[in-house]
Image (cartoon, helix red, strand yellow):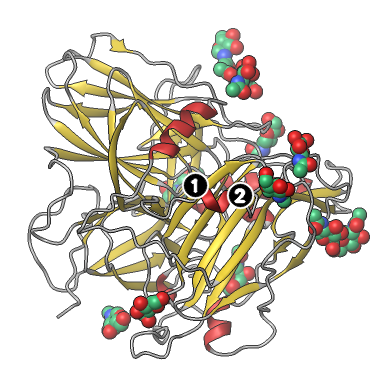
Amino acid sequence: MDSWVRVLLLAAFCILPVLVECRVRHCNFHVVAKNTTRLCSSKSIVTVNGQFPGPTLYAREGDTVLVKVLNKVNHNITIHWHGIRQLRTGWADGPAYVTQCPIQPGHSYVYNFTITGQRGTLLWHAHVNWLRSTVHGAIVILPKRGVPYPFPKPDNELVLVLGEWWKSDTEAIINEALKSGLAPNVSDAHTINGLPGRVANCSTQGAHNLPVESGKTYLLRIINAALNEELFFKIAGHKLTVVEVDATYVKPFKIETIVIAPGQTTNVLLTADQKSGKYLVAASPYMDAPIAVDNLTATATLHYTGTLSTSPTVLTLPPPQNATQIANKFVNSLKGLNSKKYPVKVPIKVDHSLFFTVGLGIIPCPSCKAANGSRVVASVNNVTFTMPSTALLQAHYFKINGVFTTDFPAKPPHVFNYTGAGPANLNTTSGTRLYRLPFNATVQLVLQDTGIVAPENHPVHLHGFNFFVVGRGVGNFNSTTDPKKFNLVDPVERNTVGVPAGGWTAIRFRADNPGVWFMHCHLEVHTTWGLKMAFLVDNGKGSKQSLIPPPKDLPKC
Ligand SMILES: *[C@@H]1O[C@H](CO)[C@@H](O)[C@H](O)[C@H]1NC(C)=O
Ligand SMILES: *[C@@H]1O[C@H](CO)[C@@H](O)[C@H](O)[C@H]1NC(C)=O
Ligand SMILES: *[C@@H]1O[C@H](CO)[C@@H](O)[C@H](O)[C@H]1NC(C)=O
Ligand SMILES: *[C@@H]1O[C@H](CO)[C@@H](O)[C@H](O)[C@H]1NC(C)=O
Ligand SMILES: *[C@@H]1O[C@H](CO)[C@@H](O)[C@H](O)[C@H]1NC(C)=O
Ligand SMILES: *[C@@H]1O[C@H](CO)[C@@H](O)[C@H](O)[C@H]1NC(C)=O
Ligand SMILES: *[C@@H]1O[C@H](CO)[C@@H](O)[C@H](O)[C@H]1NC(C)=O
Ligand SMILES: *[C@@H]1O[C@H](CO)[C@@H](O)[C@H](O)[C@H]1NC(C)=O
Ligand SMILES: *[C@@H]1O[C@H](CO)[C@@H](O)[C@H](O)[C@H]1NC(C)=O
Ligand SMILES: *[C@@H]1O[C@H](CO)[C@@H](O)[C@H](O)[C@H]1NC(C)=O
Ligand SMILES: *[C@@H]1O[C@H](CO)[C@@H](O)[C@H](O)[C@H]1NC(C)=O
Ligand SMILES: *[C@@H]1O[C@H](CO)[C@@H](O)[C@H](O)[C@H]1NC(C)=O
Ligand SMILES: [Cu+2]
C-alpha cells in the first residue's frame, strides 16, 4: 500500500499531527470570503476555511495527499503546492491555465499527489490573479517515521508565515495598475502569522506571540508568502542556525539575519539561551534597486515563559532596506548538506545549456493615459508570456493545436550590455512559447537580470523540479570565466532562487518529470507583467516515465 495519507487539518487550528497512522484521509479546503478588520481597514478577503494565514497542511514523506478544494467565492481559484515535485502528477500542480483550468465558483477539484523524496517546509497558495495574497498557508512534511532530522532534535516546532497586507482589495490593486500601465500600489504593512505588530495610528493591529521556554530549542519554519517583497528576518539577541531551505537540508550555519524571497522557506533552530524576557522579532523589506517598496517592519515577540507582559521588549533594528551585504552573507553561506544519506546530485554533464534574460520592458498601450500611452511589462529573453485560455497541460496531453508553440529561445535575440544602460528600444515580443526537453535531459540555465527600466532582484521559481544553484555573480555572465567558478560539489538545492539585481544566477536540474512546468518570477507583479515561461518535458520510454492520465474532475475552461 503506497497510498497512506497523514494529513491533519483540524477545522480551526493548526497543530502538530497526532501520531496516528490512518488510511487515505481527504482534507477539505473551503475557499470562503471572510470579513476582517485589521490594519485600519475593514474588508472582505478570500481565505481557506476562514483562516488567515490558511491551515497548515501536515504530511509525512511518502504520503499521498488528497485535498478537496471547494470554491465558495465569486472568483476563479486554483491552489499550488509550492515546491512539491508532483512526479508525473502535473494535474495537481495548480497554476491556472498552465496545468489546469481554474475551479470556477461553486465547483470543486481534488488535488491528488504523493510526496516522494521530500521532507521539510513548503507552502501552498492560490495560483490565479493576486488571490495568493490571502490564500496561502504552510506545508510541513515530516521525515518518514523513525527517520531523524540530520540536526539535533528540537524541543518544539513553530510555523511563521510572513505576508503582505493591503488595506484595499488586492484584485482592485492589480486591476488599477493594469489599467494605468504603471506599477501597482505597494502594500500597507507586512505581517507575521497575519499580524503586523505596532503600526502608527492604527487601532486594528496586533502582534504574534512566540512563546518559548528558557533553555529549549525550537525549529522555526519560516515562509515568505508575501506577493512582491523579499524580507529580512531576525530576532533580537538571538542567533539563528539555518538547517534547511525549500525543503532541502543545508550544512548548518549560524547567522543573525536571514533573507527570504516570496515562495522561499527557511528552517532555523533557535535556542532560548538568553536572559528570560521579551525579544523583538522583525520582518522588514530587502530592496537594493530604485524600486518603491512598503518600508514598514512587521514585528512579533519572542516571549520567554514567566516574563510579565508589561516588561520591556529587547529591541533590534531591522537592516537597512538596501543591505545587500547582509543578504549576500546569508545567500553565500547556503551549501547543500551533501551527507551520505542526503547527497547532492548535481548534474555534471549538461545536455541543454540555456541563457535567459529576465527583466522589464515597455510596450505601447493607447488606453494607458497615466503612463503616457505605454505600459510596463516583463519578459524572459524578450518574450512577454501570454496566458492561454486553455490550460497548457491539457493542450499538450489532448494534442490541441494552436494553444502554444515550442520555440522558446535558448538565448536572448540580441546580445547587449544586459546590466548597462540598456537598449534604446524597450519593446518586447509576446507569445505563448514553451521550451521543450526530452525526458531526463540535464539542463544548465543562466538567469541574467537586465537593467531595462530598472535592475531588480527576481526570485525565479521553477515548478516540478528542484534545482542546484551552481553560481551567482554581479554584472554580465561571462561564459568563459564564470563556469570555472561553479560549485558542482555541494551547491544548495532549492525551488526558488533570487537573480541578483544587475547580476546573474546559474542553476542545473534534471528533466526527470514529464509534463508542462511553469517558471516565473515569484514577485506577483512581475508574473502578471509577463516574466514567465514554461518547459514542456516529454514522456520517457520507461513504464513510470509518463504523465498519468488526467483525473475525471479536472476543471474545464
Ligand atoms: C461581509 O460584510 C458585508 C457588508 O457588511 C456583508 O454584506 C457580507 O455578507 C459579509 N460577508 C461575510 C462573509 O460575512
Ligand atoms: C490518486 O491518484 C492515483 C494515481 O496517481 C490513483 O491511483 C488514485 O485512485 C487517486 N485517488 C483518488 C481518490 O482519486
Ligand atoms: C493606490 O494608491 C493611490 C494613492 O495613494 C490611491 O489613490 C488609490 O486609491 C490606491 N488604489 C487602490 C486600489 O487602493
Ligand atoms: C498619526 O496621527 C497623528 C495625529 O493625528 C498625525 O499627526 C500623524 O501624521 C499620523 N501619522 C501617520 C503615519 O499617519
Ligand atoms: C517609508 O516610506 C514613506 C513613503 O515613501 C516615507 O515617507 C518614509 O519616510 C519611509 N520610512 C522609512 C523608515 O524609510
Ligand atoms: C543604502 O541607502 C542609503 C540611504 O539611501 C545610502 O546612504 C547608502 O549608501 C546605501 N547603501 C548601499 C550599500 O547602497
Ligand atoms: C556595461 O555597463 C556597465 C554599467 O554602465 C559598465 O560598468 C560595464 O563596463 C559595461 N560592460 C561592458 C562589457 O560594456
Ligand atoms: C512594439 O511592438 C508592437 C507589437 O509587438 C508594435 O505594434 C509597436 O510598433 C512596437 N513599438 C516600437 C516602439 O517598436
Ligand atoms: C525585443 O523585441 C522587440 C519586438 O520585436 C524588439 O523591437 C526589441 O528590439 C527586442 N529587444 C531586445 C532587447 O531584444
Ligand atoms: C537519467 O539519466 C542518467 C544518466 O544521465 C541515468 O543514470 C538515470 O538512470 C536516468 N534516469 C531515468 C529515470 O531514466
Ligand atoms: C570574459 O572574460 C574574459 C577574460 O576576462 C574576457 O577576455 C572576455 O572578453 C569576457 N567575455 C565577455 C563576453 O565579456
Ligand atoms: C473563470 O474561468 C473561466 C474558465 O477559464 C473563464 O471563462 C472565466 O472568464 C473566468 N472568470 C473570471 C472572472 O476570470
Ligand atoms: Cu521579478
Choose between 31 and 349: the one closer to the eye.
349
Choose between 454 and 333: the one closer to the eye.
333
Residue 481: image tag: 2
Does the image show residue 97? Answer: no
Q: Position of residue 61 (x, y in %)?
A: 22, 63
What residue is at 12 percent from the left and 52 percent from the top? 148
Quarter of the figure with the C terminus: bottom right
Q: Position of residue 497 (x, y in %)?
A: 49, 49
Mark 2 Cα shell of 10 Å, populated few (<14), some (14-19), many (≥20): few
Q: Are marks 2 and 1 in contact (CB under 8 Å)?
A: no
Amino acid of disc 2: Thr
Q: Quadrant of residue 299?
A: top left
Quarter of the figure with the N terminus: bottom left
- Name the side, left or right, on which 465 lies relative to 4: right
Marks 2 and 1, how far apart at CA: 41 Å
Amino acid of disc 1: Ser
Does the image show residue 413? Answer: yes
Residue 133: image tag: 1
Label 2: state its secondary structure.
loop
Choose between 285 and 451: the one closer to the eye.
451
Q: Is residue 214 above or below residue 426?
A: above
